[in-house]
Image (tube, grey):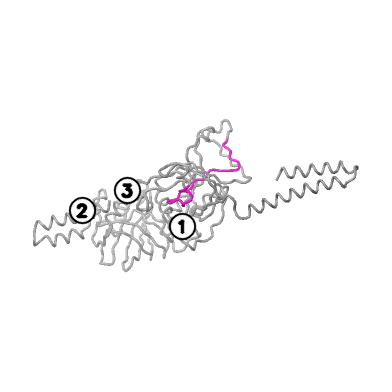
Amino acid sequence: MMLLRSNSLPILIALAMATSPIASAQQASDESTAQPSAIELISGFDLARIDAAYPPSDPAAAGELAKLVYRLQSVNESVLVERARGNDPQSVGQAMPIDGTIRSIEFVDVPPELVEFLEFRRLKLIVVQSGENDLTVVTANVSNDAAIGDRVRGVGVVIESASDRSVTIASPRLSWIPDSAPSVGWQMLAGEGVDIGALADVSTRNRKPLMAADADAFYAIMSASANVATRTDLPAAPSIGATKLLTDAKSLAGQWMQLDLETVQITRIAVTQPNRRSQLGSDHYFQIDAVAELGNAIIKIESSDDSDGSAATFERRYPVSIVVRDLPPFLNKTIWEVAGPDAVVAEVSRQISIEGFFFRLWSYQTEYMQQFGGDDQFGPLLIAAKITDKAITSSDPVGVAMIGWLAAIGIFGGLIATVLWHRYTTAGDRAVSTKRKQREADDIDFI
């Protein structure tokens, strides 16, 4: 779509130049630099009303500013981003990107009579240093953990322009990238520019279907994971079992971990939204349905309709879902062999090890759960950075043949020893010998 827009621009300029030989040069220059105002996107606001909203020097102005931010939250963010692209505006009403370091944070209380309707109690006025510019950003939607020294990103609309290097912007939301993160996983994702504020919110939706609120973090982490996969200095990923993922999900969002799995099915999922394709760097990703070992644990999921006391029970293994932008070559090859190169869904059984980030517990419908009242199945959803083949690919791996020969020699030697034992023992020991032989035979059968 960007190519179509850029290709259409020279045609428009050419038409303008053909109209007036003298004025056309200035007109072409204006058209090449002018950016459309974003005021038309903010329902009910014009320049005069924006001017009355800032600064919030009294309750009336604070109320107008809160309404402005509230209206901005309903604007399609991708439209704002598009209008701010390549823009360095200094005039009120223009869209502008935000990316910088927090220098200070102040708060403005929303008038009590508006809180019920706007659903936020205060605004944050955040001074952000972006290059040589000082931006004052007004928003109600940024992580409460955001602090001085952290990085924030977003897009907004200029509501005051004091000088060439000092503007005030109203923003519907800001991404938060902390200067220091409490875990290795968060540090890695923050380093890739992932909004940790959105990630921290993910765990509040555990055991629910994937929602629109998950999309930003979901695609951002998948894109970051693809970048992480190219690194050669990855930190060791602690091995996590399926049981811990089920019991400690709330504290594990965004954690870097390793998990052993057996694949069951691989599905290629198309990404249709242009903004998500751009964010992901691909028009598709893959979902791997797999199972993980439970060890001795038994998982029971009780039905919401517990009138009959039935519960879905999982022993030995539990379903786990993995998403990844790009499959490793060995899985691509397996899919081609099983279902062909154009397959969308392929049943693949393969032992793998994944390194990646835990997303959350998500729910989905299964036939098995229909037997227990129809509640949704829920399970861990991870976003993989690296997938390693754990299957034995050689017909005779190093050492296997030698072990087989040693085992055969041991058994043959045992048989000879048994014959000699029978030859040289007395008749009185034959009963004991028979019992011992039986035990040896049982041992060989067990092996």
Q: From the viewer's perspective, tell me whether residue 271 is left or right of residue 371.
A: left
SS for callout 2: helix
Q: Quadrant location of residue 142? A: bottom left
What whole-number distance in Å separates the C-alpha atoms at marks 3 and 1? 36 Å
Please state which amino acid type lies under the numbered disc 2: Ser
- Residue occupying the point 54% across, 60% down: 236
Front label number (3 vs 1): 1
In the image, which residues are magenta? 311-333
Q: Is residue 131 magenta?
A: no
Magenta stretch, main secondary structure, is: strand
What whole-number distance in Å separates the C-alpha atoms at marks 3 and 2? 30 Å
User: Where is residue 65 drawn, in percent x and y?
Assistant: 30, 54
User: Where is residue 61 drawn, in percent x and y?
Assistant: 29, 56
Q: Nearer the viewer, residue 318 or 230?
A: 230
Q: Nearer the viewer, residue 84 or 399?
A: 399
Question: Can you identify the residue that label 1 sits on?
Answer: 229
Question: Can you identify the residue that label 2 sits on?
Answer: 8
Mark before the other along the chain sequence, 1 or 2 = 2
Question: Can you identify the residue that label 3 sits on?
Answer: 74
